[in-house]
Structures are given as C-alpha cells and as structure tokens.
Amino acid sequence: MDFLEFLLEPLRYAFMVRALTAGVVAAIVCGLLSCWLVLVGWSLMGDAVSHAVLPGVALAYIAGVPFAVGAIVFGFLAVALIGLVRDTSRIKEDAAIGIVFTTLFAFGLVLISVTPSDTDLNHIIFGNLLGVSRGELIQITGLAALVFLALVLKRRDFTLYAFDPVHAYAIGLNPRVLGATLLGLLALTSVVALQAVGVILVVAMLIIPGATAYLLTDRFGRMLVLAPGISAVCAVIGLYVSYYADTAPGATMVLAQGAVFTVVYLFAPRQGLIGSRVVAARRRARDAASGKAGEPLRATTGR
C-alpha cells in the first residue's frame, strides 16, 4: 500500500470522515482552551466539569432532549456548586471540587445503570467517535465555533486574568466575571469533546496540549498556535492508528497526545529534561572552544 492509498483508504467511509471532522474540531477547541487552563492552574477544575456533565447527559436522554442541553446545564451547575461549597464553608477549593465532581459523576453512573435504553449510554463515558451522526457533528461544530470565537475575541482579557488578575481589576476588568466566563467555556468545551473521547478522557484533551506547548515556548501567543496545532495533528494520527490497528479512537488520540508530550518533556531544547542539558553542554563546549581559540591571539598581541 502506497502512502496516498494509506491516507485515502479511511476517507472512503462516511463515518470516518465525520469522525475525523469531529475529532479535529474537538481537538482544536480543547487545545486552545488548554492554554489558559494550564496557566491558571485549573487542571482539576477541568476534570471536575468534564465528569460532572454525566448526569446531565443521562437525564437529557431520559427527557428526550439533545445531550448537549443536559451536559451544559450540569456543567454550569457543577461550577456553581463548587463555588458555593468553597465560599460558604471552611472547605478549600480542591476539596470542594473533589466532593462535587465525584458526587455528580456517581449520580450519572447510577442513572445510566437504571435507565433502560436501546442506546449504549456507556459511549458517554468512553466516547463514540465512530458513531457520530450528521446531527451530532453539526452540534459539535456549532458549539466549538462558539467557544473558539469567544476565546479569540476575549483572548487579551483572559490572558491578563491568567497572568495578573490584580492588574486586570486595576484597569477596570472584573476578574470574577472573567473566571466565570472561562468556566462556562470549559463546560461547553467538555460537551464538544464528550462525543470524541468520552467523559473519562476529556480532561486529557483539555490539559495535555497546553502543557506540551508550555514546554516549547515562553510566549503565550505562540502557545495559542502550538497547542491547538499539536492537538489537531494528534487527533488525525490517533484516528488513523485506530483505523488500521483496530483500537479505540478516542483513547488512541489521547495516547498520541501523551506520546508527543513525553517527547517534548524529554527533548525540548530549553525545558526538556534531556534536551536542555544537551543544549547547555554544547554551549559550554562552544564557549570553551572559543576561549581556547582566543588565547594564542591574546598572547601574540601581548608580545
């Protein structure tokens, strides 16, 4: 099989085209949002919101409404409950997050276990990328476009909030509103990625791309390009590998992201565990060589 045939073979099937489109769209918007989540330190919050939407999805199925409706409602509910527990008790934020998301996730599992259904609701937990319908693809694309536009249009405000919320307040911005908006976009993004990788692995798509880009550059503007780019490439690679290796597509996409992060973590020129040491050793060797080369010249000049 030549390379062109390798690329075109999966695209002969409509379900693979829909899966590829949905996977890339979800990867791009997750990668973009992950830049702010990594900087603000909301990895656990991303995990909480992505798990907390499960009962909303189950209730939406029972009520006969689109999954996204229930997921969005419970995503915002989770954020509100976390803030309520944190602000009205001695419980710290990390504990409040753990209490709320585990309770809601367990509630969702109970609902799924007692709900008679012709649809395999376990796909909500593990993803069903190959089963994305035309209607679901439109829903995913629409929500992703909404989140993408909001992040791009408000990127300066969100960036200032991530780096220095005190300064943001000083120039007239409301850090509380900006934080709530980011949490709302997080809930919407969790719904976008839900169909691709399921509740369990959504947090990986929300964290790994941003963390990878963070090791590659010190400029936030470059992070906003690198993270979604890396995420989209990993989505394509993961889907192709899953097609030819007959593996779970969502999990394979996340595995590709994890592999890229590992390579960057080890070999990034400035921040890599091995790469930074190699660069430093080469710099010392170059400095030593230039110093030795300059010694005869100085000696000659001295005479």
Image (cartoon, rainbow, N blue to C red):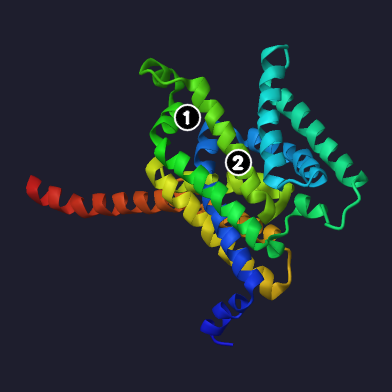
* 130 left or right of 123 in image: left
Disc 1 crowd rating (10 Å Cα; few below 14, some 14-19, many 20+) is many
Total count of labels: 2
Kindly identify the residue that appears in the image at 67 percent across and 24 percent down: 80
**Residue 188: mark in rendering:** 2
Horizontally, residue 157 falls left or right of residue 138, namely: left
Q: Residues within 10 Å of mark 2 (few under 14, many from 20)?
A: many
> The N terminus appears in which quarter of the rendering?
bottom right
Q: Label 1, label 2: how many angstroms apart (C-alpha)?
A: 19 Å
Camera-side residue of 203 and 270:
203
Q: Residue at x 38, y 54 (%)?
A: 282
Look at label 2 and name its amino acid: Leu
Front residue of 263/14: it is 14
Query: Which of the 4 image quarters holds residue 160?
Result: top left
* Res 265 visible: no
As helix, strand or loop, the secondary structure at mark 2 comes to: helix
| Residue 162's disc number | 1
Q: Nearer the viewer, residue 292 or 235?
A: 235
The residue drawn where x is 70% and y is 29% is: 77
Q: Earlier in the sequence, mark 1 or mark 2?
A: 1
Front of the two marks 1 and 2? 2
Tell me where residue 88 appears, x and y as whole percent.
Answer: 70, 12
Give the quarter of the image for residue 84. Answer: top right
Considering the numbered disc 1 on the image, is that residue within a helix, a strand or a loop? Answer: helix
**Marker disc for residue 98:** none
Looking at numbered disc 1 in the image, what kind of residue is underneath it?
Ala
